[in-house]
Image (cartoon, helix red, strand yellow):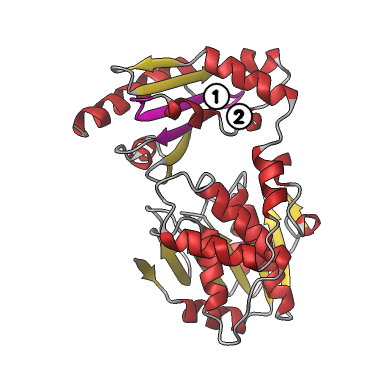
Amino acid sequence: MNKYDSFQQVWQAIEKGQSFFVAGHLNPDGDSLGCTLAVCSLLERLGKEAYAYASPAIGKDLFFLPGLPKIHVNELPPKPQFDTVILLECSDRQRGGDLESVLQNAKTLINIDHHLVSDAYGDVNHIDSTASSTAEIIFQLFEASENGLLPTPDEATCLYTGVVTDTGRFLHTNTSAEALRVASALVALGADVNKINQVIYFTKSYTELKLLGRALEKMQLLFQNKYSQIILAQSDFELFNAVPSQTQGIVSQPTMIPGVEVSALLKQEPDKVSVNLRSRNHIDVSAIAQHFGGGGHARAAGFKVSGKPVQLVAEELAAVVKEALSNAH
């Protein structure tokens, strides 16, 4: 169910503002970045000023998104003065990065999110944990407008990217009838489905494919083959001159194995260990991620740990997963 403020209250806050700062979460994915671009485009069509922001970097697989040159990557204005800040898919105030200089000087903060665990940190909060994606919510926001606004083809492409990536090409359990309705409407409005599919799902570099092979080679099955664990050390990335951001999709591969309930990908980085989690059916991996200070969704979540070797993080994670598996049966 929807929590907190209605679409009408969101629209009222938008109507009052003239200058807007719009951002998604750190390391934006298709949903976060797609929504940022679509919302900024909408604001500009309404005659507003919109400053789109992303941090710390944008993955190359999203370079095709319309309007991308308008994104300021790691570039905050020296003296931020905005009427309104809109944070998208940020489950807490810090999820968008170090934005305090922006937030402190804004009159209104609008928070739009779909995470199961999400803080109501905004002046206006629209949080719908039943939504497949924040893009689904933004499309519904369009529909709720008094003037009957509809996304342009470019906006539809951005929003469809959010829906299709957060549902895993409509394979995840968050693929609801509403998600499919929204996706269908966006296609009818001109979303470039062919480009989205080709760029995101059917384009991989040589390095990415070699890294996938390395990851599958290192995959371990634990706890009666219900838990898959992959550890990629810094040496693995160095072997192929790769970076951690080139591991997209790897964590989902082991869930194709019958019997695997939870899959984890642990990446050793210079200053931290990053962990991605996926679940097939019964295990809420967001609860596992929360145990380590992270979060996400029931079937897809993650967290980061600093100051610990990757093997220790792997052991601690395995213990938590083992308990979750035991409690699920």
Measured as percent of width and height from the top left, residue 248 is found at 60, 33
> Is the C-beta separation of discs 1 and 2 under 8 Å?
yes
Q: Secondary structure at mark 2?
A: helix
Q: Residue 243 lies in what quarter of the image?
A: top right
Three-letter residue code for mark 2: Thr
Q: In this figure, what is the number of numbered marks?
A: 2
Image mark for residue 247: 2
Vertical order, 147 against 241 (above or below): below
Instruction: Confirm whether residue 305 shows in the render.
Output: no
Mark 1 vs 2, N-terminal side: 2
Q: Is residue 149 left or right of residue 95?
A: right
Question: Which span is picked out in magenta?
Answer: 258-279
Residue at 63% from the left image edge and 67% from the top image edge: 188
Vertical order, 181 against 168 (above or below): below
Q: Residue 158 lies in what quarter of the image?
A: bottom right
Image mark for residue 267: 1
Measured as percent of width and height from the top left, residue 312 is found at 41, 17
Measured as percent of width and height from the top left, residue 150 is found at 63, 76
Q: Secondary structure at mark 1?
A: strand
Instruction: Confirm whether residue 129 shows in the render.
Output: yes
Overall secondary structure of the magenta section: strand
Q: Is residue 200 left or right of residue 9?
A: right
Vertical order, 24 against 207 (above or below): below
Using the image as rendered, state which of residue 107 and residue 64 is in the foreground: 64
Residue at 59% from the left image edge and 24% from the top image edge: 269
| Cα–Cα gap, marks 1 and 2 | 9 Å
In this view, the mark in front (1 or 2) = 2
